[in-house]
């Protein structure tokens, strides 16, 4: 609860599910290698803080993402609690087999709205990447898993610039047709602004995609993460991705801020009286704890303000 006061705004949901992506999307973009013990404790602390969806790790080949080479060990050691979902990123059939062997019940696949990023990230065309995911999603659905489809570069691409709405809607529809249970729309380079967010969500609604199937994944590179979130909530979105402490830089703009920080998001949602079930104080303590292990302060403004980390002065 925010001791500075709570006021509601019309047109917003009563509750929001936060998809905490710190352990996967956050750590994946951190250069300091984090030991397995710390990763397991990190996920458990996030759940202790009240998170019910924590994206835990990724089954990508260790050569691509050395930080997450210990995925199987993390999943084996983790005390997975009932009522909490621990999604795992799965790039292909082999990754799905490994995930199923470890009792994973929620997976995510990673697609791109643009050809340039599909080529850079997956070394495939958009169509080829969807062909690769088709059997993965089908088999996961047969096994009753939830499947989140990430869609990158929805609001801009570093090579292509502006991305046509129709192009994003087309790939989104194809992901849902494959059987994805949820779409996470990614502003991978953080260039979106609120009007652009509404334009895409309106286009998806017009194409018949229910807002309940959509999550938003904003990056704070240009300081727009919270404004974009508010715009999305007003369009009926109730699932928001965020990373504890703002973990994970932006891989395409060196030293720029990447993922929206969960604490910054919570400060806003708590102040609006929107229920999340996540305790801001516990979460900020967890982020400060992890920042110490990474050897640098959290980039989250709320975390710094709440924990005194980062040497910010209140003078002036
Ligand atoms: Mg991200």
Image (cartoon, rainbow, N blue to C red):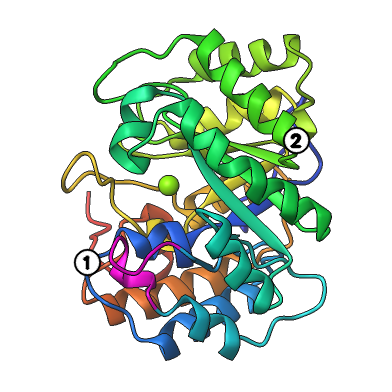
> Which secondary structure lies at badge 1?
loop
- Indicate left or right for 110 with 288 as reference: right
Q: Which numbered disc, 1 or 2, marks the residue that appears first in the sequence? A: 1
Q: Hey, which quadrant is residue 184 in on the image?
A: top right
Q: In the rendered structure, does residue 64 fall within the stretch colored magenta? A: yes
Q: Hey, which quadrant is residue 130 in on the image?
A: top right
Please name the residue shown 43% across and 66% down the image: 306
Q: Is mark 2 within 8 Å of ligand 1?
A: no
Q: Which residue is mark 2?
A: 213
206 over 93 or under it: above or below = above
Please name the residue shown 49% across and 65% down the image: 59
Q: Hey, which quadrant is residue 28 in on the image?
A: bottom left
Q: Which residue is mark 1?
A: 31
User: Where's residue 279, x and y in %?
Assistant: 64, 67
- Indicate left or right for 249 with 18 as reference: left
109 over 93 or under it: above or below = above
Please name the residue shown 55% across and 8% down the image: 166
Q: What's drawn in magenta, residue-wise?
A: 60-69
User: Where's residue 173, x and y in %?
Assistant: 67, 23
């Amino acid at each position: 609860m925010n001791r500075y006061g709570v006021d509601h705004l019309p047109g917003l949901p009563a509750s929001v599910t936060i998809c905490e992506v710190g352990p996967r999307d956050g750590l994946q973009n951190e250069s300091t290698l984090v030991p397995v013990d710390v990763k397991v404790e990190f996920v458990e602390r996030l759940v202790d803080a009240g998170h019910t969806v924590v994206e835990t790790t990724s089954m990508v080949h260790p050569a691509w993402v050395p930080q997450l080479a210990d995925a199987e060990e993390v999943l084996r050691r983790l005390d997975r609690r009932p009522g909490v979902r621990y999604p795992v990123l799965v790039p292909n059939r082999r990754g799905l087999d490994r995930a199923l062997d470890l009792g994973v019940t929620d997976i995510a696949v990673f697609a791109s709205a643009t050809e340039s990023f599909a080529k850079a990230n997956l070394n495939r065309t958009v169509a080829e990447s969807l062909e690769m995911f088709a059997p993965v999603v089908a088999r996961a659905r047969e096994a009753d898993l939830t499947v989140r489809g990430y869609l990158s570069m929805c609001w801009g691409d570093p090579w292509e610039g502006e991305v046509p709405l129709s192009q994003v809607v087309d790939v989104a529809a194809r992901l849902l047709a494959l059987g994805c249970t949820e779409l996470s729309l990614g502003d991978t380079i953080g260039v979106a602004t609120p009007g652009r967010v509404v334009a895409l969500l309106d286009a998806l609604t017009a194409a018949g995609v229910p807002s309940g199937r959509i999550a938003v994944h904003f990056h704070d590179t240009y300081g727009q993460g919270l404004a974009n979130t508010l715009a999305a909530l007003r369009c009926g979105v109730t699932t928001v991705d965020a990373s504890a402490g703002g973990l994970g830089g932006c891989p395409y703009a060196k030293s720029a801020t990447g993922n929206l920080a969960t604490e910054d998001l919570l400060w806003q949602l708590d102040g609006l009286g929107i229920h999340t079930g996540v305790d801001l104080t516990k979460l900020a303590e967890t982020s400060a704890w992890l920042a110490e292990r990474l050897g640098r302060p959290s980039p989250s403004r709320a975390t710094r303000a709440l924990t005194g980390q980062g040497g910010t002065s209140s003078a002036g």
